[in-house]
Image: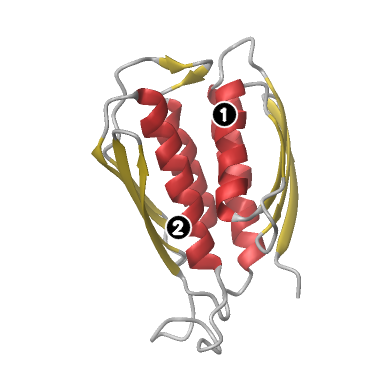
């Protein structure tokens, strides 16, 4: 059974198409109009082995806020739809990712309860055209709409590009682990019997 999702969301601020295949090969087709954000979403696809399409036409003449947050909303919805009833998945995922001087850990739980925490701080307002305050808003939107518990912590690092990129890549690796099927899990991994 294919673990895929395709979602279109159109508002007065953004028009977004997301396609996600959890069992892909890392193929990406990304166009949000924000170069660094495209780079990060490409990294999510590649390092998570997801096939991912994200096309967004947003009101970038205002700023990048609506584009980045709304892409997080739709990506979170796509993750929730693609995992479906969550039968057979590992549910939890975590990864510690080094990138030069930076070390970031991401841990997540596809538990059906939304929560997000990060202690990542940035010393510049932008990385390229990506506003660094949108880092939190993107992952918060993903966590809320995927109904996942998501933590991203910086264990070390000073370069803003490295901190952001290590975080996106760690998220990809943790999500790949959490959505992976385990033949030992015949239903859902919960003592309650549901997630």
> Is residue 121 left or right of 177 when viewed as pictured?
left
Residue 192 seen by the camera: yes
Residue at image coords 61%, 47%: 46
Lateral position of residue 130 relative to residue 98, left or right: right
Q: In this image, 120 relative to 184: left or right?
A: left
- Which label's residue is closer to the chain start, 2 or 1? 1
Q: Is residue 184 above or below residue 169?
A: below
| Residue 119, picture quadrant | top left
Q: CA distance from mark 2 to mark 1?
A: 19 Å
Give the quadrant of residue 124. top left
Q: Which residue is mark 2?
A: 174
Element type where label 2 sits in the image? helix
Instruction: Identify the mark at residue 67; answer none if there is no mark.
Output: none
As displayed, is residue 104 above or below residue 162?
Answer: below
Assess disc 2: are there few (<14), some (14-19) or many (≥20) residues with their C-alpha within 10 Å of its C-alpha.
Answer: many
Q: Residue at x 45, y 49 (%)?
A: 171
Mark 1, residue position = 37
Q: Is residue 62 left or right of residue 171?
A: right
Say if 100 sits above or below 155 in the image.
above
Q: How is the image coloured?
A: secondary structure
Which quarter shows the N terminus?
Answer: bottom right
């Amino acid at each position: 059974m294919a673990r895929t999702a395709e979602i279109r969301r159109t508002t007065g601020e953004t028009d977004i198409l997301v396609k996600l295949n959890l069992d892909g090969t890392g193929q990406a087709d990304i166009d949000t109009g924000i170069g660094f954000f495209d780079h990060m979403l490409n990294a999510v696809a590649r390092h998570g082995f997801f096939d991912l399409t994200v096309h967004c036409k947003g009101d970038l003449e205002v700023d990048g806020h609506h584009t980045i947050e709304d892409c997080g909303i739709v990506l979170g919805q796509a993750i929730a739809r693609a995992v479906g009833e969550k039968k057979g998945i590992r549910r939890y995922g975590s990864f510690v990712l080094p990138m030069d001087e930076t070390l970031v850990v991401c841990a997540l739980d596809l538990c059906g309860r939304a929560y997000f925490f990060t202690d990542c701080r940035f010393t510049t307002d932008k990385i390229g055209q990506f506003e660094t305050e949108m880092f939190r808003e993107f992952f918060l939107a993903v966590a809320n709409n995927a109904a996942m518990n998501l933590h991203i912590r910086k264990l070390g690092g000073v370069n803003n590009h490295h901190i952001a990129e290590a975080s996106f890549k760690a998220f990809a690796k943790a999500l790949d682990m959490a959505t992976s099927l385990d033949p030992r899990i015949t239903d859902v991994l919960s003592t309650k019997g549901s997630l």
